[in-house]
Structures are given as structure tokens and as C-alpha cells.
Amino acid sequence: MKVLLVDALASGSGRRRSSIDVIGAGPRQIAGILETFGIEYRLVTAEDALISKAREFDVLMVSAMTMDAPAARRLAARHRRAVKVLGGPITNDPTVVSRLGYDFGIWGEGEAALARVIEASGLSEPSRLTPDIPNLLLNRGGRVVAGPRRRLTPGEFNSFSPSTEAVRHYRSRPHYRYARVYVEVERGCSNFIRPALTADRKICDVCGACLGSRPPLEVCPQGIPPGCGYCSIPATYGAPKSKDISNVVREVESLIALGAQRIILSGADFLDYGRDREGGALHPCEPGPNLGAVEDLLRSIASIPQVRDGEVYVGIENVKPCLLTDEAVSLLSHYLPNSVVHVGIETGDDSHARILGRPCSSTLAEERVKAAAEAGLRVYAYFIHGLPGQSMATARATVEMMERLYRAGVEKFTVYRFKPLPGSAFESLQPGPPAREDRASALIESTARRLNVARKRGMMGKRLEVIFSSNFHRGARVAYPIREGPTCLVKGAPKSVRVGDRGCVLVTGLVSDRALLAEFLNKKT
């Protein structure tokens, strides 16, 4: 049996427009299961799968997000004779399995389900599959029949090992030698507060769970999914569960041995690490981070020789502001100096944050992000425009906060447009309007762009250590700062510089709010 495993994450209609230097953790997790069963596979990105000559495979497996439905459809049409399997966040809407032309899909945590499918010979004969397999989505004549939904226990989560060898399949864009390779250390989210926007306040007053009068509930009396209204993570994956430190260290060491040079420790919230709660909801902020577990993990990672000596960069993504305590900031600064920390804020208005189901107020979020930036952490702050409940008042509060955070030292502002996700509390709402059509959204987006440009102008004349890709843009070699940062278009790089080589460049100009122009100085040996 030959399997074509396609990483379609962030591919949209077939080509990544952002995160083009990222290798996610999900496809490697699936590759690990295939390797366990001795199944031959080829792992490619959607872009490579769609531009290369179609080859015959017995099975097509596609990992995708909701935004990647066009690419998933094209891939299914390209491999009509193969057994077609769909997985990833896209299956939070089960109907996509039949609509996009797949034989079956796997919802949520797919590891145990895929193992059961393989044991039942379902990859070669999907007609043998029955809907008693948890998380299985069967296409039966255009109608999707779903198996029972089930989440992994922490023990099961740790029993499935992602493939590290699979990283070597990424040899085009991205190439594993320069990419940010994501290593999952935590899964799930502790925010079981519900957004007030979609709730009946009278029922909420009686329940009291999201109002602080009782602990958060796993199941809402009104049936509202947990978490921020625009996010489906807690509904899909449940409360946090953490990877054993030994598993994380073994994975990082193996990736480094294979040639990876930039590692991102990932999770819905890195500071939920060690706050595991099996079979129940957890408050997003109290008690605070498990500092002992976080320190043990970071100490173990930082003691890996290549990390300790600066040969390999390690960053983290993401954290909730309310868990970014002074003690947590101190730990991150000590073990990961000069690394980037990504923090979600989304709105600068307290009342807006409350109706969105945010884990803490915008005021507290600003306080904690300022404290982190002023302590020397490199903070990237996330915001969303077009959110339900947005107004000119909430937009002005947001941009005023962004200005204050800029003055406090926040390095980058990332702004997304709201799109309703299947499985989230806001899944039935309309997408936010494009910034060009809405004054409030335009204000947020233009402010982020202006502040990002200003920050990059401050980098003129500075030297950066970068890692080179094989790509060219506007006649310049594309390179990425080792320790994250703006993409660099490097002039004067000699042809002898290979993919994954490192060098020093001088920043000479501004290309956009996302990219810099630089001159090659020397190659690091």
C-alpha cells in the first residue's frame, strides 16, 4: 500500500500565502502512526502535490483547516482512484467529507481512530468500516455517518509518537533546514468560559459558571461550545493535556540530529503545560501556570547542547495573557532569552472581551503584555478585526491599546479578519467585513501596519543572523532571521550559499510591513 500524505494546512486554494516557513505538528503525528504500522508513505505540501505530475497512490490522506477546503477539493479530484481520507480542523464541519469528495474523515484527535481504521483494513477497503469507531466520519452515498466523539486521555496522547524522519520530506517550500518546525507540547485549552454574545443572560444568572460564582462547566446548559466564540479548540480537544518531558526532549533532539535549526514548542497555550485536567473543565486563569512543570520542561530543552550553544533556536507559541505572570515571564526570559512569545489579545475593549468569551479582561491583557515586553521578552500580539460586536468604539479602544503596547516595546502586531469556524460558538454568524469595506476594521488593520512599519524602520542599519531558503523574490534571496522576525530579501548572497546555511546580513531598506531588504555580509561557518 502506498499513501500520499498531504500537508494542506494554510494552503487555501493550493498555495500558501503566509506561514511559508512553517512545518506543523499534525502531519508528522499521522506519519508516525503510518510508520508504526509499516505503511509506505510520501509526505508533501498541497502546493507540491498540485503542481507535480499526478502519480498513482492507493490512499490519499489530507490534513487541512477550514480555509483549505478549495485545496482539499482539488486534491480529491486529482486522485479519483485512491481511497481518500480527510482530517484536521476542517472536519469540525462533518459535511465537508462528502462535499469535497472523500471516502471518510476523522474528526478531532485522530490518532486512535486512524489506528483502528488501519487495523480494520479500512485504508484499502473503506466499505469495511463501521460507525462504531470513535471520531470516524463515513461517507455513505453522499451522507456522512458519524461515529461517537471521543477525546484522548493524557496517557493515550503520550502513547502516540510523531515521526521525526517525516520532516525530511519537506524539501521544497518549506525546507526543513530553514523552517520553523512545530513540536506539540500541550493540546487542548483551559478556557471553558462561554461568550455572552450568544447566551441567554437569565439562564446564565441561574448557572453562574461563566460569571465566577461556580467553577466552569464541561457542558453548558444552553449548549454553547466553550472558549472564545471564534475558537473551536476547547470544544474539539477539551481541557489541557501535556506531553511528557522525555517525549518532548527526544523529539527535539531527533529533529536537531536530522538538521532542523528552528524549533517552536507549540500548544493552544504553552503556559497551560502541566495544568492537565482529565474529564473536567478548568478555569483559564486560576490557579496560575504550573511553574514547576514549565521550568522542568524549559530546563530540559535548554540543556540540549545545540540549544544551549545557540546553534538551534527554540521559541514558544502561544500564551494567554492571564497566565503570563511575573514568575512566568522570569522563567521564559531565563531559559529562552531573545525568543518570541505570541500572545492573543484580540480586542482592546473590556466589555467586548466579555461578550466574546475571552479568558480575561483587555485591561489585564494589556497589563501582562506590557510587563512581559518591559521585562525584555520579545512579544508578538494578536488582534482580530470584524469580530461580532465590533464598533467604532471598540476599534478605537483597540488601536489606543496597540499604540500603548508599541511604546512598551511589543515587537509585532498580527491582525486577522474574523471568520466563523465550525464547532465554535460563533459558527453560525457572518464573517467580518473586509477592512476595505468597514471603517472600524480598516482602523485596526491600518494601525497594525503603521506600527509594524515603524518598528521595522528602527531596524535599519542593524545586523541580523539569518538562515537562507532556496527561494528568490524580486531578484533577492529569501532568508529568515534565526530567532524569528521579518522576512529578509538579501542582495549579494553568493551562489555557494545553500538552503539552510546561516549568515550575517545588514538591513538596508523596508520592503513592506512584513519584509526587509538586506545586504549579504558573510556566511557563518
Image (cartoon, helix red, strand yellow):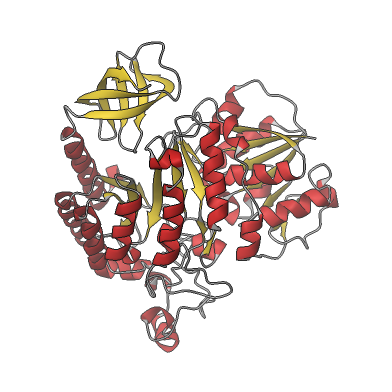
Q: Nearer the viewer, residue 288 or 259?
A: 259
Q: Which image quadrant is residue 504 in?
A: top left
> Where is residue 404, by image quadrant?
bottom left
Residue that protrudes farthest toward the top in the picture: 495
The front one of 44 and 187 is: 187
Instruction: State which quadrant residue 153 falls in.
Output: bottom right
243 left or right of 313 in image: right
Q: Is residue 502 left or right of residue 459?
A: right
In what quadrant of the picture does the C terminus appear?
Answer: top left
| Residue in view at x 42 percent, y 54 percent | 298
* Depth check, front residue: 409 or 263: 263
Residue 351, position as x, y percentages in the image: 27, 70
Question: Where 12 falls versus 393 (above or below)?
Answer: above
- Is any atom of residue 230 visible in this view? no
Visible residue check, residue 274: yes
Q: Picture coordinates of residue 37 (x, y %)?
A: 77, 44
- Picture coordinates of residue 466, whole percent (x, y): 34, 28
Does residue 518 appear left or right of residue 335 in this picture? Answer: left
518 to 154, vertically: above or below = above
